[in-house]
Image: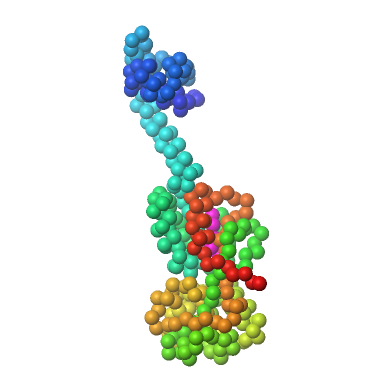
Amino acid sequence: MDLNLRDIRAFVTVAQAGNFTRAATRLHLSQPALTVQIRRLEETVGARLFDRNSRSVALTQTGRELLPLLQRSLNDMEQALRDARALGEGASGTVRLACLPTFAASALPELIQAFRTRVPQAQFQIRDVVANIVNTLVRNEDVDIGVTGGNTVDATLDVLHTGEDRLVVVCPTSHALARKRRVKVTDLGGTPLVLTAPGTSVRAVVDAALAAAQCSPDIACEPTYMMTAVAMVRGGLGVSVLPASAREVRAEPGLVTRTIDDPAFVRPIALVKKRGRTLPRVTEEFVKAIAHAMPKRKSSS
């Protein structure tokens, strides 16, 4: 049975109006066009739905039994159309995002809060993971977009925006490096280091920068997460090199950060999606918010 939404709406409107002329006016149709829709629905159903005379129209028994069924169907279909339109316009939908823990704990909460003031029906699924997992989640379409670290060379991903995150030394206020305004790379070679584990985007930058400076590090611990690295620094196991944006660092009153006097201690960050995939409209709008919040990448020239 091929039920047409316009025909169902015409039937319900005539039943409510009790008159073809009033129903045609409500539907912005000519009366002959409305009559065609009712006849088409009656042919589809296989039964007369209205008894008509020159002055009034009344539902048949079949029409009375069908009215509540078709009214519910009409309401459901109209709601589905409203929901579909909201998704298409970006007024609702789910933003599926994988991102670096530093971004998740710093800029992201404020971004979501501000976005929801404009798009109250927006929902968010957040995965805060290290960079290589961000890329995997985007590649496997477990999420739609990712904020990742390092130089993205994955041919399956499109880079939507780029930025950077400067790395700083994190040490206790009592440490000798805390008395310096800027730390030299050679200073790092003479103290135990708490570095994030190999495979993390921060560690890749630190290893490359130390190697370029021909500095051999004394690695005391290699935790995966920055919160653990900060705890180990607080516990006196060494100093760490972490992104300046890391909220874990700013939340520790007993620790200070110092700039490293070397431009190599910068982690590239990128906003990515899977190549060839169209983003939901609500996600496209959130991409603009992320791009505006990402620290801009300075020219290497």
237 magenta-colored: no
What x and y, as percent, mark residue 173?
42, 87
Q: Answer with left or right where residue 29 lies relative to residue 145.
A: left
Residue 172 higher or lower than 280, as above or below = below
What x and y, as percent, mark residue 85?
47, 40
Q: Please provide the residue range marked out in magenta.
A: 144-148
Question: Which residue corresponds to the image point at 62% horizontal and 57% vertical from the top-left?
Answer: 158
User: Could you say which quadrant of the image residue 76 lies in?
Assistant: top left
Residue 180 higher or lower than 266, as above or below = below
User: Is residue 60 among the parts visible in the rendering?
Assistant: no
Query: What colouring style does the render use?
Result: rainbow
Question: Which residue corresponds to the image point at 59% horizontal and 81% vertical from the top-left?
Answer: 262
What x and y, as percent, mark residue 139?
59, 57
User: Is residue 27 among the parts visible in the rendering?
Assistant: yes
Q: Quadrant of the C terminus?
A: bottom right
Q: What is the chief secondary structure element of the magenta stretch?
A: strand
What x and y, as percent, mark residue 132?
58, 66
Question: Which residue corresponds to the image point at 36% horizontal and 8% vertical from the top-left?
Answer: 54
Task: Please state the total of marks drawn on the protein image.
Answer: 0
Question: Which residue corresponds to the image point at 52% horizontal and 67% vertical from the top-left?
Answer: 295
